[in-house]
Amino acid sequence: MPSFRSGRDQARHAVKQLADIGTSRHANRDDGRVRSLRTARNYEQALSGLTSWLQNNRLGSLRDLDRDTALRYLGERSEQVRQPTLDQDRQAIQALLSEKLPRVVSELSSALSGRAYTGEQLAAIAAAQTERHALATELAAACGLRAHELLTIRRIEEQQPSGHRTWRPDIHTGREGVLYVVSGKGGLRRTVMISANLADRLEARRLDQGLIVMDRGIRYKACYDIGGGQAWSSSFGSASRRVLGWSTGAHGCRHSYAQARMDELQSAGYRYKDALLTVSQEMGHFRASITEVYLR
């Protein structure tokens, strides 16, 4: 049922229902109650932004919010704000839902902190890793994958890209290979183009029954015996420090992809703006401004 209250009024009402100002926090940990005026103001601001998003996407009001919609919002929000603000939003939503949500990593913070590796540097890093982690490194660099997305690779006949987004018809243009699907921020599913050689090596490590992997508190069913998540990120960082003497982290693979792909598309005649929008969708977000951060 739609709410006729403004976003601010909905947020204020929700926080009022959660408020228990002045009571001891130490005696009532993790009960989701709001015990300070500062927290109340922060939660009201966070929930007001959420309500506006719900209204703009015709997804109802705060009363209609569920876990999947909340994670979709946080996934989109991760492209707009840094980690402290994103964590504050998540905490406010957790209190509203009375349910713990997995921590979402800010794409903006990650993009600002990472730096690209050259192809030669990536090859040296992969050579210093185990076979399963090395393949993950090659896939991440070739497709612009996030660490956890390596755990979600599916054949396209097994998983379809998200239907609530309008995908450009020219994504992956100029590249050849096999289409797969990965799940990214907020559960957004997108296609990735994996070269025939990498796809053959990936399929050689396909698991008959799949494998349940817990990564940062989230449960994934991996279909391939390759690295992914925190374990792969740690392997990547360690290998980088061993062979290069430094590391900008596994997220550097996404920087490398963005820069290489922009060069490809512009060399093929794409205008800068069109190339930027295409690469943005190939990387699993829809804000060209985020892609520009990866180009620094």
Image: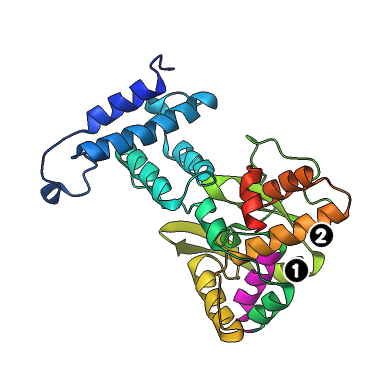
Residue 198: mark in rendering: 1
Residue at the image point whose x is 22% and y is 48% from the top: 30
Element on which disc 2 rests: loop
Query: Distance between the Cα atoms at labels 2 and 1?
Result: 9 Å
Residue 207: mark in rendering: none
Q: Residues within 10 Å of mark 2 (few under 14, many from 20)?
A: some
- Residue 49 percent across, percent down from the top left: 43, 32
- Residue 237 percent across, percent down from the top left: 54, 75
Residue 216 lies in quadrant:
bottom left
Query: Can residue 58 be seen in the rendering of this structure?
Result: no
The residue sitting at the front extreme is 296
Residue 251 lies in quadrant:
bottom right
Image side of residue 81 versus residue 242, left or right: left
Q: Relative to the observer, which residue lies in front, 159 or 61?
A: 61
Q: Relative to the observer, which residue lies in front, 295 or 22?
A: 295
Asked if labels 1 and 2 touch by Cβ distance under 8 angstroms, the answer is yes
Q: Residue 237 colored magenta?
A: no
Residue at the image point whose x is 40% and y is 17% from the top: 3
Residue 270 versus residue 19 in the image, above or below: below
The residue sitting at the right extreme is 269
Element on which disc 1 rests: helix
State which region is magenta: 128-141
Q: Residues within 10 Å of mark 1 (few under 14, many from 20)?
A: some
The residue sitting at the top extreme is 4
Find disc 2 in the rendering and name its residue. 177
The mark tally for this picture is: 2
Residue at the image point whose x is 55% and y is 69% from the top: 249
Residue 68 versus residue 242 in the image, above or below: above
